[in-house]
Amino acid sequence: MLDKPSFPYGAGFRSLTAETPAPVALAVTGALPAWLKGALLRTGPSKFEVGARTYNHWFDGLAMLHRFALEDGGVTYANRFLKSKAFCTAEASGKISYSEFATDPCRTLFGRVAAIFDPKLTDNCCVNVSHYAREIVAFTETSMPMRISQDTLETLGVFGYGAALKGQVSTAHPHYDAKRACHYNYIADLGLRSLYRLCAIGDDGTEKLVAELPVDRPAYMHSFGMSGDHLILTEFPLVVNPIDLKLSGKPFIRNYRWEPERGLVFHVVEKDSGKLVRTAKVDASFAFHHVNAFADRDGLAVDVVAYPDATIIDQLYLARLRAGTKLTATGTLTRFHLPLKSEAPVTRRSLADVPLELPRINNESCAGKPYRYVWGTGIEAQGDFLDSIVKIDVATGQVSTWYAAGLYPGEPVFVPSPSANAEDDGVLLSVVLDTGK
């Protein structure tokens, strides 16, 4: 058992290993709206030690599923580990057995050679949960999302892609297009001839290859953009030689190199035709998360939470977080304007002068369309971990903040009111770490 850290947020980086498979009632302070019914499902890294080893990075921890059921003004809670192969093998062997974002198993020379010819993709889906082809699916950054039961949190197996969508790396943030009744995602196929594959997954489970884009040095892309009629791949200049992934013996992300001279490159693809309509370049920056994209004047507005470089990845190594090292990298809500009717340059501007991460919008009414409000986590105390919830009015730049000392909120999820007349009429749901408990 780790000692209690001297800095508040460190409690969030201790392993949680207790499961509560049978729902338990939670105390409710105040009153929930009568219309708020359903279940909030979350996934996240939870177990950071296997045997004598500790995972290297926050993103590596073994996934725990959480369910908050809301009905008749009450809330129940249950949690279970995602029973992935990565988890089950680690439990059975007492060793880390699958490569994660920044952690590799300890292998013999023979094991390292074998891994070159038969790499095991992790199915440790600790990033996101979403409806996907009428199923509930947990995601990580490989092409091995996992199906789960929304009622019991039971792990139901891999959501398998067909041969046409072959690849190893994907995003944990697919976009839903209600008009076309499908999700869009991208899968990177890394090898001697690498490709980005943009795909559509219909509500009925049908798969469609939208486009293939060849690439020599694939970029690390945690998310991508979607407007009403276009998909936008945003190539940040954090790139990899695919051969290094096979031969270097280093964990996944340590093979990527920051090459700012490459700039930030946008590839815009039509959803219906698969046509690449523009590739455009602007000065280098980095982002994990896209916020939204929409048709704007002669082109597209693409909003992301931008960083000047990729050093935020280094700041999220577990040893740093457990040591209470101050965080200095902050993301800023940034709008890129991409002209489509000309070769005019891409422009960029900040939409609000406030730190932001884990952004969410009113997806039901605004995904791929002009929007006004974004919610996310912020940093109120300089150098702290994400300690507040912020709401940004992208039209005016006005910022509203919720903050309480010792409380660390997770990604806020916006739920619109069924009788909403305004974009921001609804409630926010956030799982908050209370370090005073």
Image: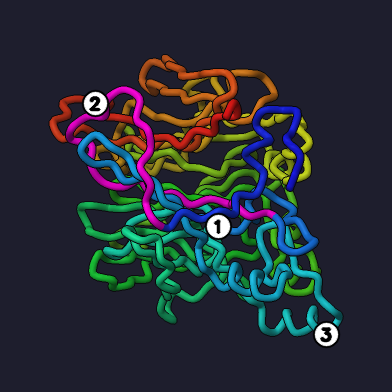
Q: Which residue is mark 2?
A: 425
Image vertical order of residue 156 relative to residue 152, above or below: below
Q: Nearer the viewer, residue 294 or 261?
A: 294
Amino acid type at mark 2: Asp
Circle 1/circle 3 CB separation < 8 Å: no
Q: Which residue is mark 1?
A: 63
Q: Is residue 130 above or below residue 164?
A: above
Q: Which residue is label 3 attached to?
A: 110
Q: Mark 1 belongs to which amino acid?
A: Ala
- Look at 40% across and 60% down and name the residue there: 153
Q: Which residues are magenta?
A: 22-48
For image coordinates 68% across by 54% down, the residue present is 48
Q: Mark 1 vs mark 3: which is more N-terminal?
A: 1
Inspect this view and state whether residue 213 appears.
no
Check the image and name the residue furthest to the right: 109
Locate residue 256, reporting x and y percent. Answer: 72, 56
Foreground: 344 or 247? 247
Task: Inspect the image, locate mark 3, and give the three-letter code of the amino acid beneath it.
Answer: Phe
